[in-house]
Amino acid sequence: MTNIVHILNAAQIEQVITKYAANKVERKAPGVVFAAKLPDTSITVYKSNKVMFQGAGAAREAAVFGEVAATAPKVTNTKGDTLPDNFENMSVIGSDETGTGDYFGPITVAAVYVPANKVPLIKELGAKDSKQINDTIVREIAPLIMQSCTYSLLTLRNPRYNEIQAKGYSQGKIKALLHNQAIAKVLEKIAPEKPQYILIDQFAERGIYYNHIKTQKLIIRENVLFSTKAEQLHVAVAAASIIARYAFLLEMDKIGEQFGMPIQKGAGAKVDEQAARIIKKYGKETLQSVTKWHFANTTKAFAKLKKH
Ligand code: MN
């Protein structure tokens, strides 16, 4: 299916909405302000001023409304594998994780398959490194990516994390296991189709990564590439970083509801403060159930309690 995305100004958006008013359909998806359906083309207007044309008539309809936005500039200073030419336009499974540096909340890992024909769509939905976009945008874009692509999302909540951490699993090993599993699930979902490559946002060198997962029954090795800054090298990794971040935010929302306050991200002084308050009010087991217990924040929170 053809997907074409244009970024339009307010006047052009008005033209689109007027032109397709008679073909308007209801689309409740987040970020969508208008949608229309022709016999051979779907037109979707997003709050971000992106207009997507999908289907056999996409090129014909989109041609009326100007040029597709230019692609991102080349990335340099990455570490890891050298990628083939034109890599950014290939069919790729990307994987990335979130939450490893946050005291509160889970580790989430996502793997996403973006086939070559969906690369423009995912780019134009605004998929880039989730560290470069704010959480409001993450919440808006993630569901759109999840509707458009095959993905797998793994959430390692704190009780299980603390259990395996206490058994001696390093964060590197935990991440490697989750990445391998998420990628395997996506491969299973898209079979018999295969990606041209799998790109992992590098947190460990290849040898270390495979050493971490050597006892697994299913170890994904074929066409696997590693690179740092991988979010910028293929939208599949950017998409994975956004889905992982989104899942992390939803979990943090839940924890926040449990305690009736927004939960601090990261591992700084405010986190210690909040952890101390939770111990005081709910006890240490409760705090343990929502945190990465081995972090220094635990000791610091207890120290703060003593001072009060
Ligand atoms: Mn990463």
Image (cartoon, helix red, strand yellow):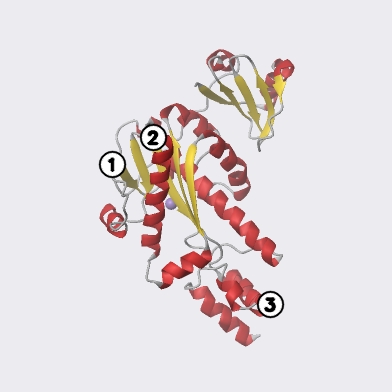
**x and y, in percent, of residue 256 in the image:** 66, 62
Task: Evaluate whether residue 171 shows in this view.
Answer: yes
**x and y, in percent, of residue 185 in the image:** 42, 44
Q: Tell which of 234 and 79 is nearer to you.
A: 234
Secondary structure beneath disc 1? loop
Please tell me which residue is depicted at 56% across the width and 69% down the height of the picture.
289
Quarter assignment of residue 308:
bottom right
Please tell me which residue is depicted at 47% across the width and 69% down the height of the picture.
162
Is there a contact, CB below 8 Å, between mark 2 and mark 1?
A: no
Is there a contact, CB below 8 Å, between mark 1 and mark 3?
A: no
Secondary structure beneath disc 2? loop
Q: CA distance from mark 1 to mark 3?
A: 51 Å
Amino acid identity at mark 2 = Ala
Q: CA distance from mark 3 to mark 2?
A: 50 Å
**x and y, in percent, of residue 305 in the image:** 62, 83
Instruction: Specify the label residue 76 is tagged with.
Output: none
